[in-house]
Structure formats: C-alpha cells, structure tokens
Image: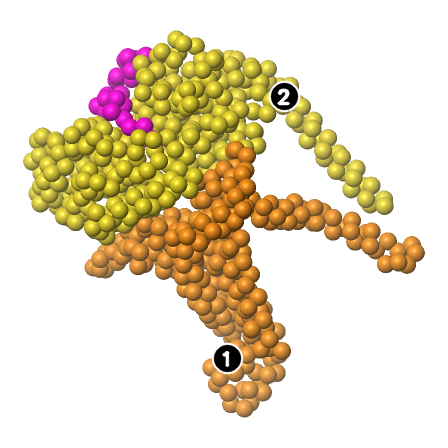
Chain colours: A orange, B yellow
Amino acid sequence: MGIPGNKDLRDGILFSLPFMIIFALFMIFPLVFGLIISFYKWDILSSPSFIGLKNYLDLFKDEKFYSSLWHTLEFVLITTPVLLFLGFVMALMVTGKSPLKGLMETVFFVPYIFSMTVVSTLWAWLMQKDFGFFNQVIKLCGGTGVSWLTSEKNAMWSVSLATFWWTAGFNMVLFTAGIKQISKEIYESAVVDGASYLQQVFHITIPLVSSTTVLCLILQVIASFNVFGQVYVMTGGGPAGSTRVLVQYIYEAGFKYFKMGYSAAMSYILFLIIMIISVLQYVLLGKKKD
Amino acid sequence: MKKLLTVLALLLIALSLFAAGAKEEAKSSEKIELTFWSPFTGGDGEFFDAMIEAFNNSQDEIVMKNDMVKFDDYYTKLTTALAAKTAPDVIVVHQGNMPNYVNGSLLALDDLVSKDILDDFQSAPLDACRFNGKLYSLPLDVHPIVMYYNTDILKEAGITKLPQSAEEFLAAAKQVKEKTGKWGLGIDNTTGTYKAYTLTRLFFSMIAQQGGSFLNSDNTKANFNNEMGVKALDFLKEAVAMGVNPNELDYDAAMNMFKLGEVAFYFNGVWATGTLEQTAGLNFKASPLPAFFNDGSCWAGSHTLAIPVQKNQDPAKVEAAIKFIDWMTANGELWAKAGHIPTRKSVAEKDSFKALPYRSDYVAAAAVALPTPSTPAWDEVYGTSSDMLEAAVTKNQDSKSALAAMEKKVNEIIASY
C-alpha cells in the first residue's frame, strides 16, 4: 500500500469482490433485513406495519416458544456429549494400530455424506411403530414393539440416535486430525516408561487434543442448537408437539402461519443464545489452554 | 488488466448465450403457453397428470405446463412467488387457505367467467370461494372426510347393519375385536409424517353434527369447550381406552392397516379411494361420514383453481387460463378417479362419472360438507388443535380440562393475527 505502482490493494479488492458481493447479498442483507422486520407485523403479501418491540414481548409470553426452546436445549444436552465421545472413540480406533482402520474410517464417515432427508426418512422407516424394521425384529424375537417415535418419552432419544449415526463421523475427522498432530515421540517415551494404552489416552491424547475438543464442542453446540431437519422429517415435531424444536417453530411461524416479524424475532433470540454460549465457551475453555 | 478483460469478455459471451436461448424458446411456440403449480404428489398426482395431458390433447391453442410441488413446501413456495408477483398463470389453492391470498394476490373472476359456467357449479362449494363479495377461484372438487369399511371383517364379526350412532359404533367395534381379533376402528391419533389431523376433522364434524360449530360465527373465538365438545372428545378417547382403536397410530400406519385388512372402520378424506381400490384382496365399501350424533355433517376441504395477479397481466393468458379452468372442472369425472367429488352439476349427470364405483356412494356428502372457517389464523388453529387432541386421546386426559386448555390456546392464536 502507498508504494507507487503497487496495485495490491486494488487487486485485493477485485479478487475478493465476487465473494463480498455474494456475502453481502445473501448474508449481510438478510441479517439486517431480518432484524428490521422483527419490529414489524408482516404476512409477506400485505405491507408491513411497525409494532416496535411487540414481537419480542409476545414471545416471552408464548408457551410454545418456551417449550420449543426447551426441546432444543434437550437435544443439545443429549447429543453434544455423546457425539463428542463417539467422535473421539472413533478417532482413536482409526488412528490406532488395527489393520481395519482404513475400512473403519470409511464406514464411520459414510453416513455423514448422506443428505439429511435421506437419513431421516430411512430412520423414520426403521423406527415406524407398526411396520418398521426394528419392531419387526423385536417381535420376531418375542418382544413387544417399542414406540420409537410416537411416545413422548422416546421420541427425542430416537431422533438423537439417528443423529449420532449420521454426524459422529464429522467429529471423528476433526479428532483424527488433532490426534495425528501429536508427536510420536511422546507416546514412545511413555511406552518406555511403561504406560498402558489407557494411561496414554488419558494422560497424553486427551490433554493434547484439548484445542480440537474445544473446537468440536463449539461447532457441535451450534449445530445442535440449529437442529431442524431430522426432527421435522422423523417426528414432524410430534407426538403432540413434544419434539418441536425452536427452528421448526421459527419455520412454521414464518412460512406456514405467515408471521414474518414474529418468526424473525425468534430467530434473533436464538442467534443471541448461540452467540452468548459460544463466546462463553471460547473464553472459559480457550483460556485454560493458555 | 488483460486478465480482467478476458474474464469480462467470457462473461459477456455467457450472458449472450443465455439471452439467445431465451429468445429461441419464445419464437418456437406460437401456442399460448401457461404454467401451473399443483401440490398433488400423493396418490392423486398421476390422475392429475393424466388430466393435464388430456387437456393439452383436447385443443391446439393452449399448452399447459404442470409443475408438481411437494405438498409440504407448496404454500411456502406459492406465497413467496405471489409476493414477488411471479406466480404461475394458474394455481391450486385449498379453499381453507384462501383468506391469506384474497387481498390483492388473486385475480377476481366475476367478470371473466360466463354466467352459464357459473350456473353449472354447485352453489355451496362455489360460494365458499367468494370473499368480500368477490369470486377469487373456482372449485375443482370437494373432498370430505368419509368412512371406509371392510366388508369381509364385518361379515366375519356378524355385523349386518351399519352402526347409526357413536354408541353403536363403539359397540360394533367391540364386537369386531371380540369376534375377529381385529381392530374395530382405525382412527389415526399421532403425528408421523403427517399430523393427527383426522382427530380434528372428526372432532370438527361431530360438533357440527350436534348443532354446534368449532369456532363462533364470526371466527373470532373457540366454540367447542361445551357439552358437545366433551361428547365428541369422549368418543375419540373411548375408542382408544376400550382397546378397539390402536393407540399411537399415525396416518400412514392407519392407511396400511386398513389396506392389510386389519381394521373394520376407517375414516379418511375421499382421496384415499383411489389408493384403496387398487389394493388387491381388499373388499371394502365407502359411505358418507355416519351420523355419530344428530346428522351427517362432515369436515371437507376443496381444491380450487385460481389466477394469480401478475406484474404484467397478459389478457390472452388470462383468457386461456379461464378456458383451462373451465375444461378441468367440466371434466371432473377424470379427477373423480382420484376419489374427489366433482363440483359441476353437468359432471354429476355424466354416465362416465356414475360408472365409477364408490364415488356415487359418498357423493351425497358434498351437500353436508362444512366449509373451512374463513380466518387467516385457521392453519395455526388446525395444527395446534391436532396436537392437543392427540395428547388428549393418546394419554386419555380429562376431556373438560383438555378442552379448556385447547380453548385458551385457540383464542390466543386467533388474537395474535
């Protein structure tokens, strides 16, 4: 910059322009527009009317908002620890000495490349109460069928189960990368000192992948908070709304019931929640490492 | 700089290619080309496609291009297109969804359709398409909830006469269960790929059968938290509590069980007929929704055909669209193959319609079909009521407190619009 004849700045701007235009058009603009319409009452088809903070005030009186938020939280609390654990264990298996590790890596990761709709439809069929594969097998073995998706007690767990199978592979990839960065010499000296495999895992691997763990945790919490597709396809939010998550309610309020402003206000609350949790995680967990 | 110029030149070439493509397309068709969106991806889709094809073959002025949109996404897609005024030339709108669209998104048809055509429509479904004194669409069909019953099971259970009241239905269902071990009733009551709308449809019908209505007359308040509501909900709960109707039964499973001959009495919209009659080995009959209480009033939906308002409305296209709508409704016997009841008087007279089995058994239901309450809040009320009735029936909640909670929720929803 500033050097005569140097066109870095101009070229820099030109090169980043394609991205910046798309980013502004599809990220910045909707973000700002969403914030603006959250202060309006708008059904898309007629002209919006300004109602100030009413959407936000209504939202705090809406039982369905609280129950949807709670179901989301439930999903986050169920899936985050399990997915981190599964991802880590899978990563240990594929970075270990097993001759099958190449095969395992593929098997563990393949579910992740399927689309949400495929995975959810498949699991919804497997778990269907009267004709599903799982219950057919259970009945063949003499048991009674389980209400996988149709009882309030089980539905969220069943959706979580499908989610484990689907997304654990992604965390495995992150953990594998983290584990591979650990220097071999550390393990070698531990072996010389007589450390068992478990001691190596607990005293070397886990402490040294902690930055990957923090990354996985933050990504996983954000992903779980944004859950929608699996729940929507597998249970439709049922039975009796007991698995309706916040993103589903946002979608329904906006695109089924045409309450655009209300829907936008809920999105902003969800955004705030995710932001606060991510910042907290980053500050609290990130600091420890330094 | 040279590179930048190359990129720009390439972009220009690409753009002109697109433009050329578009121009060519416009030149090749001298016929009027209309676009159309429909949500029929269920069993009725194939019948609809066949109808469009028959229309295109029946004349050589208009070519209709049909785009099927998955039902779940249909109204989302439609609403955004209507907001941008880029919707297709003709669309399908359920009569119940019209209140959302009649303020400037749909063309008023009063001056565009001839009186001869209008007179041929049955008045109830046609009047349901009028809002604020104007006609915004023409009804393609009426699709009420009806009853299907398995004749083999009834014979095996020794039931020779159809039950005539709520009590008789429960008794008959019990008899089926005891004599054959099969399910007496197959009313779906939980959310699967589809909400437990059947519960709301039956509840809605049963309140009307007792002389009441689901919402009050100006659709501003719930009107079911009373003796009539309790009686209706008690019947739905009792069927499950007595063990004659499966608990936690979802829509698809209910349909499958009836197809497999595991259920004696099954309730669904007439759209099930097309699928059921293709099921090998299933011997069944159809009838209008029985009078559980005083009369046979029944919930019904109606697919209507409407013309969206465009940025630049082409009068030639509007005229062609009217011709299309006229043809589709006047040949309603083709659509009746999917199970639906046609809306034109002339169609009901046609031999080709009368020859269709089952349809004539329930065609009378159209006369007692209840229109959907005309309020923009209906979709949310409908969905929420289905959730709450699902909880009440599957968990055998106390009817009075369940209805009180539902009333409160419904009133809140209506007030929020």
Q: Is residue B218 visible?
A: yes
What is the residue that sits farthest to the bottom in this orientation? Answer: A193
* Residue B22 spot, x, y in % from top left: 65, 26
Residue depicted at 51% across the width and 90% down the height: A194
- Considering the numbered disc 1 on the image, is that residue within a helix, a strand or a loop? helix
- Decide if residue B286 is on the left or right side of residue A30: left
* Residue B196 spot, x, y in % from top left: 30, 43
Residue depicted at 39% across the width and 8% down the height: B116
Residue B400 is covered by the magenta coloring:
no
Q: Quadrant of the C terminus of chain B?
A: top left
Marked residue chain, label 2:
B
Asked if residue A39 is positioned above or below residue B217 in the image, the reply reads: below
Residue type marked 1: Val
Residue B334, image quadrant: top left
Are both tags, 2 and 1, on one chain? no
B208 or A149: nearer the eye? B208
Residue depicted at 40% across the width and 59% down the height: A70
Residue type marked 2: Ala
Residue depicted at 52% across the width and 33% down the height: A46
Disc 2 target residue:
B26
Disc 1 target residue:
A201
- Decide if residue B249 is on the left or right side of residue A38: left
Residue stretch rendered in magenta on the structure: B346-373
Secondary structure, magenta segment, majority class: helix
